[in-house]
Structures are given as C-alpha cells and as structure tokens.
Amino acid sequence: MDSVVETHSVYGEYDLVARVDFEDSRAMTRFLIEEMRAIPGVLKTETLISAEV
C-alpha cells in the first residue's frame, strides 16, 4: 500500500500502528474504507490525525 509510510507492532489494546500520508481528507477516507477495512482479519480501525505544534 503506497500510502503507508511507516508501521509498528505494539503491545496493549492495538496490534499495529500505521502512519499513512495523504494529500487531502477525501483520499484518506477512501483509502481507509476501501482498502484498510477490506483486509481479511481487520476487525476495526481507529484514525488519529496528528497536529503540528
């Protein structure tokens, strides 16, 4: 998946954290719904949008 630029296996409530980059929120939404949630075994996704401070 070209939009995924970084992944980390983690302990706790989540199994994997993936950093994805997009030009706009519409592309991000399309990717999450059509690609990430379509992967067999993916039961749930949660999106956290970072903020520059």
Image: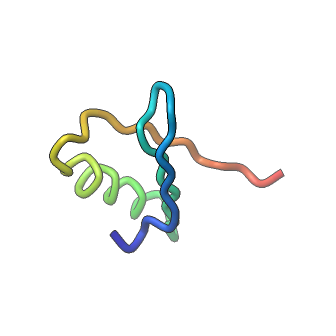
Q: Residue at left 44%, top 65%? A: 4
Residue 19: give x, y in percent of width and height.
52, 57
Find the residue positioned furthest to the right. 53
Left of 34 or right of it: where is 18? right
Q: Using the image, determine if residue 47 lies above or below residue 32.
A: above
Question: In the depicted view, which residue is nearer to us: 11 or 2?
Answer: 11
Q: Using the image, determine if residue 12 lies above or below residue 38.
A: above
The colour scheme used here is rainbow
Residue 38: give x, y in percent of width and height.
19, 50
Residue 52: give x, y in percent of width and height.
77, 54
Find the residue positioned furthest to the top. 13
Left of 4 or right of it: where is 40? left
Q: Using the image, determine if residue 42 lies above or below residue 25.
A: above
Left of 1 or right of it: where is 12? right
Image quadrant holding the N terminus, namely: bottom left
Question: In the depicted view, which residue is nearer to us: 10 or 43?
Answer: 10
Find the residue positioned furthest to the bottom. 2
Q: Residue at left 31%, top 34%? A: 44
Q: Using the image, determine if residue 49 lies above or below residue 15.
A: below
Count every numbered label the image shows and give the total.
0
Q: Residue at left 32%, top 58%? A: 30
Find the residue positioned furthest to the left. 40
